[in-house]
Each structure stands twice: as structure tokens, then as C-alpha cells.
Image: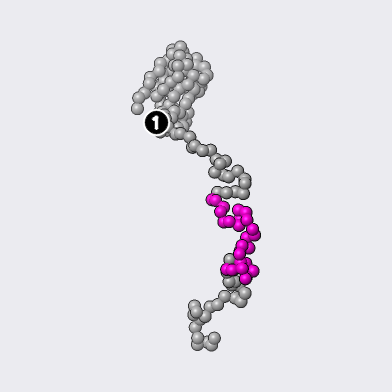
Amino acid sequence: MSEKQQLKLHHLVPAPGSKKSKIRVGRGEGGRRGKTAGRGTKGLKARNSLRPGFEGGQMPLVRQLPKLGGFTNVNKEYFAIINVGTLAAAYPANSSVTIEDLKAKGLVKHKGRVKVLGEGELAHALTVQTHAISGAAREKIESAGGTVELVTE
């Protein structure tokens, strides 16, 4: 090309030897790849009948995974739990324990409702406000001289 000619799209050609023509198989018995078209004789690979998900006799991934995904109850109530022993360590005698106070102190980290469980010992009286409480926790708080108030929100 001379200096005055511009390079245009139709002037571009691939490098010699970089392009190969597609091999057309199964076009009669006269050619090299006629009849069975390079697939050999018989068998699964000769027939093009491989089903989707077939892994060559290995246990397929579809059969390895569990069949049913289980069940999630949309109405389940989630409680942030706290034990009586934790309340005894965190609050002095004759103090009031509210849900907002528990969240402010970082003793309860979940957003939902609060439930008090009976693990640990309580030696002094506490006034406890909570959404739910176990029987053992209620018994320990009341035997120490405290009271339990259930909150409904």
C-alpha cells in the first residue's frame, strides 16, 4: 500500500496458517471419515445418546444430593436467650431488669424477643421484664424474692 491509500477493513486478512477449515465427516464411504465418521463401531460414544448429567458411571451429582430440601416454618418465633446466672452477675440486688437495658448492656444481641432460662444461681432479688421465661427461671427468681413481669409486644 502506498502512503496515500488508507487501511480499510476489507484489507485485513488472517495470518497464513492460522485458519483451518472445518472437517466435514460422514459424507460417504469414499473419504477417510465416511460411514462411522471417526467414532469407531457401536457403543455409547458412537451413537450420540449421552444423556444430560451422565458422569461416566460415577454416581451423578444429582443422585448424591439430598432429594428434599427440608422445611422452614415461617411462623417460628426466635428468642434471644439469657440465663439467670448472667442476670445475677450483671445486676445488683433489688434492681429492675428491662429488655431495653439488656440490649443497652450488650447482654442480648438479637433483635427479636427475649427469653430467660434457668441456668445458674440467683442469690438476690431482681424485678425482671421479659417476653418469655422458663419454669425453672421463674422459680429461681421468685424464690430469691424477685418478681417476673411478662411483656407483650
Quarter holding the C terminus is top left
- Residue 120, compared with residue 16, is above or below; it is above
Residue, x 57% and y 75% (percent of image)? 14
* Camera sees residue 125: no
- Crowding at mark 1 (Cα within 10 Å: few <14, some 14-19, many 20+): few
Residue, x 41% and y 20% (percent of image)? 128
Quarter holding the N terminus is bottom right
Residue 82 colored in magenta in the image: no
User: Whole-percent x and y of residue 43?
Assistant: 62, 54
Q: Nearer the viewer, residue 124 or 72?
A: 72
- Residue 110, compared with residue 51, is above or below; it is above
Residue 37 colored in magenta in the image: yes
Numbered label tally: 1
Instruction: Please tell me whether the stretch drawn in magenta is mainly helix, strand or loop.
Output: loop
Residue, x 45% and y 32% (percent of image)? 110
Q: Residue furthest front?
A: 29
Residue identified by numbered label 1: 75
Callout 1 secondary element: loop
The residue stretch that appears in magenta:
27-52
User: Whole-percent x and y of residue 87?
Assistant: 48, 22
Q: Nearer the viewer, residue 84 or 65?
A: 65
User: Whole-percent x and y of residue 48?
Assistant: 57, 56
* Camera sees residue 44: yes
Residue, x 64% and y 58% (percent of image)? 41
- Residue 87, compared with residue 24, is above or below; it is above
Q: Nearer the viewer, residue 127 or 130?
A: 130
